[in-house]
Amino acid sequence: DEIQIEKGELVTLLGPSGCGKSTLLRCITGLEQPKSGEIVLDNENIADKPTKDRNIGFVFQQYALFPTM
């Protein structure tokens, strides 16, 4: 399936536990590699682009800080 989000649109991912919401976000941000397909941002496939160069982030629902922080 294909998801297309236009500039300025707000999108919400809804679904039951285990359906792939977090996996999709992890693939978009580069924390995980997709097994197939493409992630296209501004007409550029960013699937192989390093995480630090994507300028995309999100806040985890449950987060943990390192003990030294």
Image: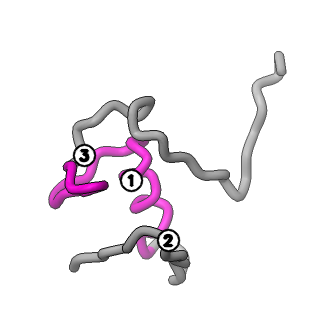
Q: Which residue lies at the image location 33% right of the left edge and 31% below the top edge?
A: 50
Q: Which residue is mark 2?
A: 8
Span of residues in magenta = 19-44
Q: Which residue is mark 1?
A: 28
Residue at the extreme top of the image, as rendered: 68
Separation of disc 1 and disc 2 at Cα? Answer: 17 Å
Q: How many marks?
A: 3
Label 2 residue SS: loop
Separation of disc 3 and disc 1 at Cα? Answer: 8 Å
Q: Which residue is mark 3?
A: 47
Based on the displayed image, in which of its 4 quarters is residue 49 positioned? Answer: top left
Based on the displayed image, in which of its 4 quarters is residue 2 positioned? Answer: bottom left
Residue at the extreme left of the image, as rendered: 36
**Residue 21 magenta:** yes
Tag 1 and tag 2, C-beta contact below 8 Å: no
Q: Amino acid at mark 1?
A: Ile
- Is 64 drawn above or below residue 52 in the view shown? below
Residue 42: % across, % down: 28, 55
Q: For the residue carrying disc 2, how many other residues have a C-alpha within 10 Å: few (<14), some (14-19), or many (20+)?
A: few
Q: Is residue 26 left or right of residue 67?
A: left
Q: Which residue lies at the image location 19% right of the left edge and 57% below the top edge?
A: 38
> Is label 3 or label 2 in front?
2
- For the N terminus, the image quarter is bottom left
Tag 3 and tag 2, C-beta contact below 8 Å: no
